[in-house]
Image: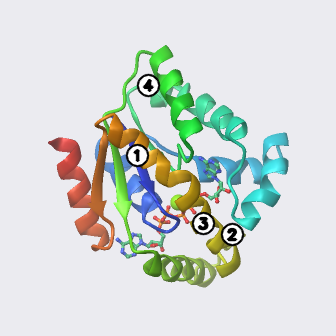
């Protein structure tokens, strides 16, 4: 099973990807997590991405496509995967199509979590305070200034990705304002249909 989760910053992509990973025993491929790992490891890609990510902008397509493509090649992704946060531009979606076609793979579903903009910042703030309370490190982009840039990037550059998949008959939408459990059930119903 190959699924893409689309949605604004804080929409619940990571939360739902983890649920799907447990249920279907396939890896969660989060481009944000991969980039944060590259930043942490100070790889060349990580070093150049850090300043962009901290401000909330999108990392160049070439960088992200390279990192994700390598991850899709890993043996554990052969039976399927959940893409979380990728693709985020139409160019990334086109690159993914090429990559999958070369491997004779197809996407099963693209699921968009629809959440009101007004609810997103509160979720990000809650995640940041919970991370602090548990002694973790808050993401460098989990602050109101970077969030505004992330949200603008989402509307300007990622919204056309939904249209790209809608035109290909792959897009399904879920009410992301519902509880985590209800969103998970709605996604499972779409996948199992
Ligand atoms: P990325 O890591 O992908 O971050 P994001 O898209 O901004 O989204 P988040 O991870 O903040 O939110 P989420 O949707 O995963 O929500 P979560 O489940 O955590 O990207 C970070 C940066 O990396 C980008 O800005 C960019 O710079 C770069 N990048 C990454 N991918 C890229 C790409 N493809 N191209 C270019 N650049 C890229 O939930 C959030 C909170 O809400 C949690 O506290 C959770 O508990 C809560 N919550 C979840 N669901 C619900 C619910 N149903 N009800 C109530 N609360 C909920
Ligand atoms: Mg996430």
Q: Which residue is drawn at 36% across and 31% down?
A: 107
> Which mark, by number, is residue 141?
2
> As rendered, which of 180 and 156 lies closer to the eye?
156
Question: At 41% from the left edge and 50% from the top edge, which residue is drawn?
Answer: 5
Could you tell me how far apart the alpha carbons at marks 4 and 2 are, in whole angstroms? 32 Å
The residue indicated by pointer 1 is 163
Locate residue 178, reporting x and y percent. 27, 73
**Callout in the foreground (2, 3):** 3
Q: Is residue 17 above or below residue 90?
A: below
Q: Are marks 2 and 3 in contact (CB under 8 Å)?
A: no
Which residue is label 3 attached to? 152
| SS category of the residue bearing label 2 | loop
Residue 123 point in image, percent of width and height: 48, 78
Cα separation, mark 4 vs mark 1, equals 27 Å
| Classed neighbour count for the residue bearing mark 1: other residues with Cα under 10 Å, few (<14), some (14–19), many (≥20) | some
Examine the image and state in which quarter residue 79 appears.
top left
Lower position in the chain sequence, tag 2 or tag 3? 2
Can residue 26 be seen here? The reply is no
Reading the image, the residue beneath label 4 is: 78
């Amino acid at each position: 099973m190959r699924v893409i989760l689309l949605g604004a910053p804080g929409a619940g992509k990571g939360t739902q990807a983890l649920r799907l990973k447990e249920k279907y025993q396939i890896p969660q491929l989060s481009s944000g997590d991969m980039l944060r790992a590259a930043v942490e490891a100070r790889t060349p890609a990580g070093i150049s991405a850090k300043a962009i990510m901290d401000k909330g902008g999108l990392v160049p397509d070439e960088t992200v496509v390279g990192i994700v493509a390598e991850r899709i090649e890993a043996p554990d992704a052969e039976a399927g995967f959940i893409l979380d946060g990728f693709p985020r531009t139409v160019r990334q979606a086109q690159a993914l199509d090429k990559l999958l076609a070369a491997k004779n793979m197809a996407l099963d579903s693209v699921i968009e979590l629809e959440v009101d903009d007004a609810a997103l910042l509160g979720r990000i703030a809650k995640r940041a305070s919970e991370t602090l309370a548990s002694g973790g490190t808050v993401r460098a982009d989990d602050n109101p200034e970077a969030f505004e840039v992330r949200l603008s990037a989402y509307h300007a550059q990622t919204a056309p990705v939904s249209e790209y998949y809608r035109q290909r008959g792959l897009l399904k939408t879920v009410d992301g304002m519902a509880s985590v459990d209800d969103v998970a059930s709605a996604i499972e119903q779409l996948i199992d249909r």
